[in-house]
């Protein structure tokens, strides 16, 4: 599901003393099947941007294309329910939205809300709970008896049960411990790889953006400052620092190491293996190693 913004502007509280231009003439493209991370300091327009993708917000000006759906500014008749069936949204702390007495009922709620039969909703719920790694022995328990990480998996299963073509993640690891964070991100990495699902992730974690994305969009002042591969984006450390962002910890470490050894190269390495290879390369003076 290709997603394109063409000259999109969004103004909160227009023509009032509280008027704020949150998006300013934004034109970006998110390819179908890609994993795109959106980064930027607080107030840069990240959340406003993604809330346009499934119609939570509508543009003040411009056009947004989401697959076959087109949202235009000032256009009244738009089938947003059909759009939201194609684009799932995992909000921060999605477990706060759990409410049913059992896990299986909670996951069934989404597809049934879109007109799916009880039996089909149950089938989808079971498939989605398996995808998020929650065994059947849990399904008839109360969701409120689970750990925080398990509750988040249930909430994600509820979105997957709708069978969207794209999923938006707004800080999906907020409040999780390191293990829970890694498990949730690995889950979405697998969904992206195995189901060719388009994933858009808003994150403050530069390492997560670097490790999991095909594309990184940097927002600043309601505009995209950069939209490129993680390697090309994080190679521009000074430009990122000017807008209040850091580079991944692995690159910070390698930068310190190259300065100690007197080198002036910018090395992009994100995974543990890439970082280890880069360290060996630096210590060998840039010569190839076996």
Image (spheres, rainbow, N blue to C red):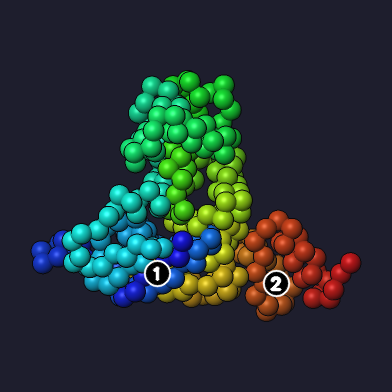
Q: Residue 177: percent from the left, percent from the top?
A: 54, 39
Q: Residue at x 65, y 75 (%)?
A: 266
The residue that label 1 is drawn on is 4
The 10 Å Cα crowd at callout 2, few under 14, some 14 to 19, many 20 or more, is some
Q: In what element is the residue under mark 2?
A: helix
Position of 128 compared to 24: left or right?
right
Can you give x and y, in whole percent of width and height, for residue 34 in the image? 53, 62
Q: Is residue 62 above or below residue 106?
A: below
Residue topped by disc 2:
258
Kindly identify the residue that appears in the image at 32 percent across and 60 percent down: 52
Q: Is residue 281 above or below residue 191?
A: below
Residue at point 74%, 58% (across, down) = 273
Q: Residue furthest left?
A: 16
Local SS, label 1: strand
Which badge, 1 or 2, is on the more N-terminal residue? Answer: 1
Query: Where the C terminus falls, by quadrant?
Result: bottom right
* Residue 174 at least partly seen: no
123 to the left or right of 105: right
């Amino acid at each position: 599901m290709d997603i394109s913004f063409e000259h999109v502007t969004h103004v909160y509280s227009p023509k009032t003393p509280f008027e704020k231009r949150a998006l300013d003439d934004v034109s970006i493209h998110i390819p179908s099947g890609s994993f795109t991370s959106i980064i930027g300091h607080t107030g840069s327009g990240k959340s406003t941007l993604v809330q346009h993708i499934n119609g939570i917000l509508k543009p003040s000006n411009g056009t947004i294309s989401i697959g076959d759906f087109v949202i235009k500014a000032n256009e009244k008749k738009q089938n947003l329910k059909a759009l939201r069936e194609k684009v799932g949204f995992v909000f921060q702390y999605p477990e706060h939205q759990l409410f049913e007495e059992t896990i299986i009922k909670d996951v069934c709620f989404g597809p049934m809300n879109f007109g799916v039969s009880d039996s089909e909703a149950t089938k989808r719920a079971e498939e989605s709970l398996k995808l998020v790694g929650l065994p059947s022995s849990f399904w008839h328990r109360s969701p409120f008896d689970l750990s925080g990480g398990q509750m988040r998996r249930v909430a994600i299963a509820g979105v997957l049960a709708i069978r969207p073509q794209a999923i938006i993640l707004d800080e999906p690891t907020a409040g999780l411990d390191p293990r829970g964070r890694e498990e949730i991100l690995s889950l979405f990495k697998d969904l992206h790889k195995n189901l060719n699902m388009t994933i858009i992730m808003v994150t403050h974690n530069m390492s997560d953006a670097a490790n999991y994305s095909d594309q990184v969009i940097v927002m600043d002042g309601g505009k995209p400052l950069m939209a490129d591969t993680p390697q090309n984006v994080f190679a521009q450390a000074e430009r990122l620092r000017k807008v209040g962002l850091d580079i991944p910890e692995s690159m910070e470490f390698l930068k310190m190491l190259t300065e100690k050894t007197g080198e002036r190269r910018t090395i992009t390495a994100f995974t543990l293996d890439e970082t280890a290879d880069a360290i060996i390369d630096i210590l060998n003076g840039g010569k190839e190693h076996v």
